[in-house]
Amino acid sequence: MAEFDPNSVPPFPIYTLVWDKQTKRVELDGMPLEPSVGQDYKQVGINAVKQKATAQNLDAVRVTVRSTDGDEWQMVVTQHGHVYDTTPSEEEEAKPKNYRPYFIGGSAALLTVGVVGAVVALNLSPEQDEGPEWTIPGVHAQIPRALPSEFDTSATWSVPVTKDSDVLELDTGHILSISETDSLVAREPTTAEPTWEGAAAPKDINAVVQTQWNGQDILAAHHGRELMLWDANDLDSGFRTEHVTIDIDHEHRVELHGQEPMVDMGDWVVGIPDGPRSLQQIVVPAGTIPLTATTDDEVITVADNEFLTVTTEGDTTHRTRYTPPDSDFTRPRTVWALDADHALLAWSHDNTNHVAIYRVSDGELLADAPVKRLPDQSSTLIPDNAANAAVLGDLLLTWEPGATGIQQNPGITVETIHDAVVYGTRSNDDPARLDLTDSEAELESWQSYGAADKAPDLVTDDGAYVVAPQLDETILYKASTTN
């Protein structure tokens, strides 16, 4: 049998065991673990990791171990209970070593005695009773905001959320919001049943992007000096997931909407995913603008008239020519990844701003237009991936075949976009929407309940979502689409 290589374990998911040295208590991903009579607390921790990995069909999993005294190290635990210390050596030199050998060593010692006993808190044992049947919450609650006529006026369901929460739809169909305890919560859209929880939600849920990290599904968010990552391989797991934080210099540009996250560090150096909690630095050709990292551990960067693919060794392996909209345009001023294969390039020339949408794989120009002003590099992209559309700053973009175009925002504060229809609030406080696929379309308003009414916070195929205060609570409502 070949020797097991802990480096072969995927970077995600990462479980988190928290150990209290004084009380001998352990938590796995926020869940307290209760030992059986005579059972060692270290044994409980490894047993819980084994059970959770088995439930997720994982042969081995990465685990971060933290003590309440502030020490931290990493290990890999296999489905059979084998434990491998994977803490990077540079971290070992900087941290006290009195805790780590005790936990790792104690865990490894379990191999000789077997891992037995139940972990009550996790409720993963097949012998344990299933929890109570889920009851849909807040059915028929009155929705306090007027919606377009195709949506119900009473809620399909409604749940409390934190005061500053917004709401997103993930590519998997799950509805994401921030709980009253400031965790990310993914819900089944029909019943509102929570199916996944991510610890330590970012301040702005609109910063969350569903993407890949070394080929693993993740949720990522960039805020200030932090790049936050959550494992999202199975959003129906029912588990709570701790997050991984990577420190980012405030001057670095982070791009999350391409194939994989990328950090433009300046000086022609780019960071791409490298293991579970670090970035590998790649030197790109001077004079080009980094666009996105790829799922093949490469970087796509933009030159005057080419998209270049650069390897980790700094070699250019592929060049795709594109034609600028004007022969006087040279290197773009700024670039944005719109999705895995589309980009927006922007130029400023002779006091004129111009933008263009390209398909990166073949360099085809899909749409271009002069604009009054360019989006800020830090503008939040609001994507509509299913319809090949997006909102970026003051620009409304579509690249669906037969309906490509670039429009300047006609005067609404955008809340969401769905099926290439933008929903927002006009300057006179009236909610309104605009169909981007119809070049002749005008803003369409609907009757509101009052001046404070906004457009829905989210629209999906089967409903609209509203986040609104109710006395001392904030409630997320779903209004289903009427037949």
Image (spheres, rainbow, N blue to C red):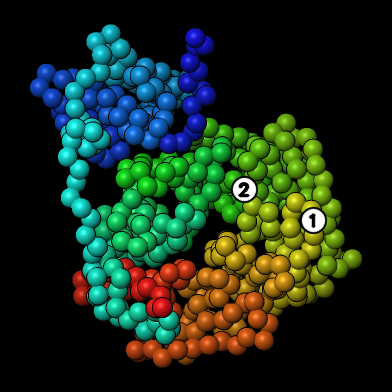
Measured as percent of width and height from the top left, residue 381 is found at 56, 63
Q: Residue at x 88, y 66 (%)?
A: 328
Measured as percent of width and height from the top left, residue 142 is found at 26, 79
Element carrying mark 1 = loop
Query: Which residue is label 1 attached to?
Result: 363
Mark found first going from the N terminus, 1 or 2 = 2
Q: Please, is residue 45 above or below residue 167 in the view?
A: above
Which amino acid lies under the numbered mark 2 shown in the image of this protein? Gln
Q: Residue at x 45, y 61 (%)?
A: 169
Q: Residue at x 19, y 27 (%)?
A: 118
Q: Please, is residue 192 above or below residue 229 in the view?
A: below
- Measure the C-alpha gap from mark 1 to mark 2: 17 Å
Q: Is residue 253 visible?
A: no
Which quarter of the rendered picture does the C terminus lie within? bottom left
Q: Please, is residue 277 above or below residue 434 in the view?
A: above
Horizontal side of 324 relative to 126 (left or right) equals right
Quadrant of the rendered structure where residue 149 is? Answer: bottom left
Horizontal side of 213 relative to 117 (left or right) equals right
Measured as percent of width and height from the top left, residue 158 is found at 28, 68
Q: Is residue 396 visible?
A: yes
Label at residue 259: 2
Which amino acid lies under the numbered mark 1 shown in the image of this protein? Gly
Within 10 Å of disc 2 (Cα), the crowding (few <14, some 14-19, many 20+) is many
Horizontal side of 119 relative to 201 (left or right) equals left
